[in-house]
Structure formats: structure tokens, C-alpha cells
Image (cartoon, helix red, strand yellow):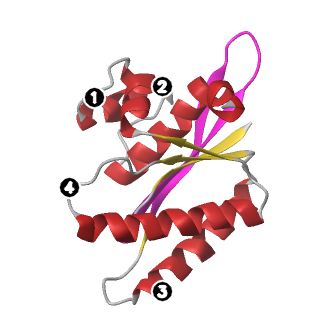
């Protein structure tokens, strides 16, 4: 099964695409990861349009069976929370148009699934993502590493969340 994980944002949107194989050992493999970057010179609408277009390309290329996204459950700055919420809306709409089920996870759930500790530091999560996906190095973009973590979290909690 192919899962796309998303760490939403308007300036940098992290994505991570993993494959989970069935068998005696459920094995996870990173297929692709990176960031969709938008220019600060873009209008809000143009940023959201680019996110939609790039996400559509990723969906067309990899054909994920599920989209996992990190939810915005706490924010320190309303100025950043609103654009992230707008990006989340575009992501949800894009998935709905492609009939891809969506699950949302809080940062606490992602950290718990990756490290076993819900209050883990970002560096701990990045190191575990590298280990769990057998990557040669930690992804350069923290947003991409977070997105891979969201996708991994989905493999651990998916059944419980989808039935809720």
C-alpha cells in the first residue's frame, strides 16, 4: 500500500511517500519525499494553487491509497495558523476530488508512533524516520522528514483512526 504523508504549510509543504508491504515482516520503504515550496512574492491564492497542482502531480505519479496529514491542533501565532489552515483545506479538497481517504494525526500522535514518546524532540523523530525507512541520511528538509513521520504514523494507527 502506498501512503502519502503531508506536513502542511504554505511556504514549505513537506511530503513523504512510503510503501508498506505485507507479509511476515511489514516492511516500510520511502519512495519519494521533499517539499513543495512557494515564493513569498506569490499571492495567497497563487500559493494555494501551486500546492494543489503539485499535490495532483504527486497523486497521479504515485497513486497513494491513503493521505495522512498532520493536523493543526495548537498554534503560537495566528498569522501562521490561518495560512496553514488554508493549505490544509486545499489538501483535503484535492484528496476528496481524487477519492483518496484522509486521516489526520496530531504532532503528539506522530511522535508517539515514531519514537514511543509523545513529547520527543524533532531530532529524535528525524533519526527514527531514518532508521525506520532505512535511509542513508536524515532528509535535509525538516518538513519532508515530518511528512515521512506522518506517513509512518498512518501505518501504525490507520485501522483505529479510519473506523472512528
Distance from Cα at disc 1 to Cα at disc 2: 12 Å
Earlier-in-chain disc, 2 versus 4: 4
Quarter placement of the N terminus: top right
**Tags 3 and 2 in contact by the CB under 8 Å rule?**
no
Residue 130 at x, y percent in the picture: 41, 32
Q: Which residue is mark 4?
A: 76
Residue sitting at x 30%, y 48%: 74
Whether residue 71 is visible to the viewer of this picture, yes or no, is: yes
The residue stretch that appears in magenta: 10-35
Which SS class for mark 1?
helix
Tell me the mark number nearer the camera, choosing from 1 and 2.
1
Residue sitting at x 67%, y 18%: 26
Nearest to the observer: residue 66 or residue 28 = 66
**Tags 3 and 4 in contact by the CB under 8 Å rule?**
no
Earlier-in-chain disc, 1 versus 4: 4
Which SS class for mark 3?
helix
Residue sitting at x 31%, y 83%: 40
Earlier-in-chain disc, 1 versus 2: 1
Query: Magenta segment: does it hold 22?
Result: yes
Q: Which residue is mark 3?
A: 45
Which SS class for mark 2?
helix
Nearest to the observer: residue 63 or residue 8 = 8
Earlier-in-chain disc, 3 versus 1: 3
Q: Which residue is mark 2?
A: 132
Tell me the mark number nearer the camera, choosing from 3 and 4.
4
Amino acid at each position: 500500500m502506498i501512503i502519502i504523508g503531508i506536513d502542511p504549510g504554505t511556504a514549505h509543504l513537506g511530503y513523504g511517500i512510503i510503501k508498506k508491504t505485507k507479509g511476515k515482516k511489514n516492511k516500510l520503504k520511502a519512495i519519494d519525499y521533499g517539499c513543495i515550496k512557494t515564493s513569498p512574492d506569490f499571492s495567497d491564492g497563487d500559493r494555494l494553487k501551486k500546492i494543489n497542482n503539485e499535490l495532483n502531480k504527486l497523486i497521479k505519479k504515485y497513486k497513494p491509497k491513503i493521505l495522512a496529514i498532520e493536523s493543526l491542533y495548537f498554534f503560537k501565532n495566528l498569522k501562521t495558523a490561518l495560512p496553514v489552515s488554508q493549505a490544509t483545506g486545499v489538501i483535503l479538497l484535492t484528496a476528496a476530488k481524487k477519492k483518496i481517504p484522509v486521516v489526520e494525526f496530531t504532532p503528539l500522535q506522530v511522535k508517539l508512533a515514531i519514537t514511543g514518546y509523545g513529547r520527543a524532540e524533532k531530532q529524535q523523530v528525524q533519526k527514527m524516520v531514518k532508521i525506520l525507512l532505512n535511509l542513508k541520511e536524515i532528509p535535509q528538509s525538516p518538513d519532508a522528514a515530518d511528512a515521512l513521520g506522518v506517513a509512518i504514523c498512518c501505518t501504525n494507527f490507520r485501522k483505529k483512526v479510519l473506523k472512528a
